[in-house]
Image (cartoon, rainbow, N blue to C red):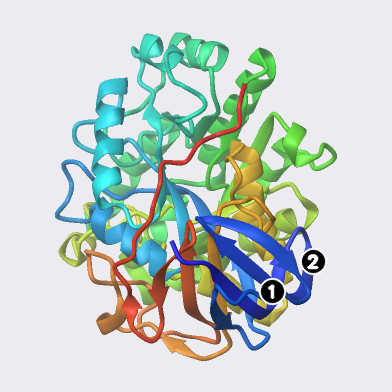
Amino acid sequence: MARILIKNANIVTDNKVFMGDVLIDNQIIERIDASISDSSATVVEAHGKYLIPGIIDDQVHFREPGLTHKADIFTESRAALAGGVTSFMEMPNVNPLTITLNLLEQKYQIAEKNSAVNFSFYLGATNDNIEEIKRVNPKNVCGVKVFMGSSTGDMLVEKQRALEEIFRDSPTLIATHCECETRVKDRQKDFLNQYGENMDPAMHPVIRDEVACYLSSSLAVELAKRYLSRLHVLHITTALELGLFENQTPLKDKKITAEVCVHHLHFSDEDYATKGNLIKCNPAVKTAKDREALWSGLESGLLDVIATDHAPHTWEEKMLPTAKSPSGLPLVQHSLQIMMQKVKEGKLSIETMVEKMCHNPAICYQVEKRGFIREGYAADLVLLSKSPYTVEKSNILYKCGWSPFENDTFDYSIEKVWVNGSLGFDSNIGLTGNFAGQRLLFDRD
């Protein structure tokens, strides 16, 4: 690979913003300094634009194998690349379910051929696969996913015995989807009896309410404390749940961490009137009061990571009556721009945005030498341009072909993205074809 010298960038890393140069050689950041000269390097003039680490998204659904009419690793990893996401961790509720190590390795083989960015995959937990879970290699698998609410797919783990075995014996991080299945099913039955399948989309967060979330997430936290498990609770949506987490322990030493997703930070139940099923997801987008509590939780350190839960469905599927319309929305191409808009609005600083989307996923998952702009780290980098960008059908790269942000204009554009030192996206030409995604490795004992 050629040597690349990025000049005069506003570098955002380690909770600082400073002007400087970055020299890349052989996939690695070789040097960071106020001024670097290197006649052998290809020079990229940043003109004072923000240079940030590549986003690490710890929760995506790329639908492969078996659900590739919605998405696949090829298309969604390219959408991720165009959005500045240089690493993803993907979920097991595909077909067949990723619940054995053999099926898990088959997904890695697909990604090695087709992924434009760095990748890892979760092994899915069931009521009966504890022996597979025990054999997970913590150094090259991101974690074990437990659906404590079944959500999409048939992976509900509801037996107390199974949950205790998983929390006791998992050799690596446990990531949970937390909604009380019994409460959700009972409430859904009541609403269907009363309103039928054409119920209003705004009823979705009433069915999947804060109590359903809290009952499940509190159980996960209780089990993690009992067995000293490494727990990461995904997509927190309610003010009530924030009391389960603490912000006094340094992140690297926390045993229990929490994530929030961009759509729960952006939308509220008021948006169902205009967005309808397009923002139907599990757990549901909830009240404006909950949304403001999530922002406070980010600021205080109760919430550690911002991710997407990118979950595409076809337009035809989303247009079904609300009761039949599947939950989930595509987000990975625009998550960085959404959060940069929040930076512009003063909801958070750019340092905090980078901390929650780049640094903290790397720390939480102990990703090896990624997530920061540091000498010796992988050259996963994003150059941002302060120029308007409108989401249109013509520039949406998701296989499903739609976005809940269509026709919205963001103030920042993704100008260039490097993955392992290779320029994979350039706004002047789009995807370059120089894809260098690698399997993520983890610095774990």
Which percent across, then down, holds residue 129? 35, 14
User: Which residue position is annotated with label 2?
Assistant: 16
19 left or right of 407 in image: right
| Between marks 2 and 1 in the image, the one whose residue lies nearer the viewer | 1
The reply to whether residue 84 is visible in this rendering is no
Give the residue drawn at x 27%, y 47%: 192
In this figure, which residue is indicated by the disc labeled 1? 21
**Left or right relative to 74: residue 121:** right
Instruction: Compute the Cα span from label 2 to label 1.
Output: 15 Å
Q: Is residue 298 left or right of residue 427?
A: right
Which residue is more in the foreground, 270 or 334? 334
Which secondary structure lies at badge 2? Answer: strand
Q: Quadrant of the N terminus?
A: bottom left
Give whichever of 207, 88 is nearer the camera.
88
Q: Residue furthest front?
A: 39
Q: Which mark is residue 62?
A: none
Across and down, in percent, residue 213 comes to: 53, 40
**Could you tell whether 204 is left or right of 209 in the image?**
left
Q: Secondary structure at mark 1?
A: strand
Taking 40 as reference, is 373 above or below it? above
Q: Answer yes or no: is residue 402 visible.
A: yes
Count of numbered circles in the view? 2
What is the x, y in percent for residue 122?
40, 33
Name the residue: 53% across, 47% down: 235
Classify 10 Å Cα crowding around label 2: few (below 14), some (14-19), many (20 and above): few
Which amino acid does the dot numbered 1 rest on? Asp
